[in-house]
């Protein structure tokens, strides 16, 4: 079974997903890392240089390739923050994967984003590369309805990542063949 983790950037998709995949003895793919490895650019750089529309095409190609490559295997994919928001991607994922929304409180997400040096260009407020809290909150709220269409909503209110991973592992274990 393909398990796709969705949620806003900084919600813990990659870190929690990696630990859960390890516990389930499943391969783990971070879609953003896959794009960087196969296209030579980090997603933020693709957006900055070529625009978001171009990046979304690359992201869709990468997602389709991964879903076609692992149709009958157990695998966990950490999606990019906007992957599940795109209608074509969402439809594809709803057909081929168990979709899990990592629902992390906004304040924790904001803290995680501030501590991440790989800031996304969609969140930058000015040339000083400061984050715009109100714009991030509006962006987050725009995407929330999409994320909530996932098959499972995982309430990630845990302070420690290993604890969150253990709880999600317990939730997902019955779905694995």
Image (cartoon, grey):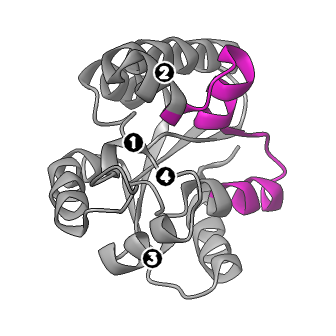
Give the percent coordinates (x, y) of residue 5: 51, 48
| In front of the other: 148 or 160 | 160
Task: Please determine whether, in this image, residue 133 is positioned above or below residue 92.
Answer: below
Disc marking residue 121:
1
The image quadrant that residue 83 belongs to is top left
Give the percent coordinates (x, y) of residue 147: 29, 49
> Which residue is at 25% across, 53% downward?
148
Mark 4 or 3, closer to the camera: 4
> Label 2 vs label 4: CA separation?
18 Å
> Label 4 vs label 3: CA separation?
12 Å
Which residue in the protein does label 2 denote? 59
Task: Please determine whether, in this image, residue 153 is positioned above or below residue 81.
Answer: below
Sequence-wise first label, 1 or 2: 2
Crowd rating for badge 4 (residues with CA inside 10 Å; few <14, some 14–19, many 20+): some
Crowd rating for badge 1 (residues with CA inside 10 Å; few <14, some 14–19, many 20+): some
> Label 4 vs label 1: CA separation?
6 Å
> Which residue is at 73% across, 55% downward?
18
Mark 3 or 2, closer to the camera: 3
**Which quarter of the rendered picture does the C terminus lie within?**
top right
Q: Report if the CB atoms under discs 1 and 2 are less than 8 Å apart.
A: no
Helix, strand or loop at label 3? It is helix
């Amino acid at each position: 079974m393909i398990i796709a983790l969705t949620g806003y950037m900084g919600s813990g998709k990659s870190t929690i997903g990696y630990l859960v995949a390890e516990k389930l003895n499943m391969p783990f793919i971070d879609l953003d890392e896959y794009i960087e490895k196969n296209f030579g650019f980090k997603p933020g750089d693709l957006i900055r240089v070529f625009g978001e529309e171009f990046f979304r095409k690359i992201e869709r190609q990468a997602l389709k390739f991964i879903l076609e490559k692992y149709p009958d295997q157990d695998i966990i994919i950490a999606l990019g923050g906007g992957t599940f928001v795109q209608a074509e991607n969402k439809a594809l994922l709803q057909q081929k994967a168990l979709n899990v929304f990592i629902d992390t409180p906004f304040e924790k997400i904001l803290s995680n984003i501030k501590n991440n040096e790989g800031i996304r260009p969609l969140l930058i407020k000015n040339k000083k590369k400061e984050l715009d809290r109100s714009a991030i909150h509006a962006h987050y709220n725009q995407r929330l309805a999409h994320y909530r269409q996932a098959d499972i909503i995982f309430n990630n209110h845990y302070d420690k990542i290993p604890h969150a991973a253990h709880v999600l592992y317990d939730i997902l274990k019955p779905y694995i063949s």
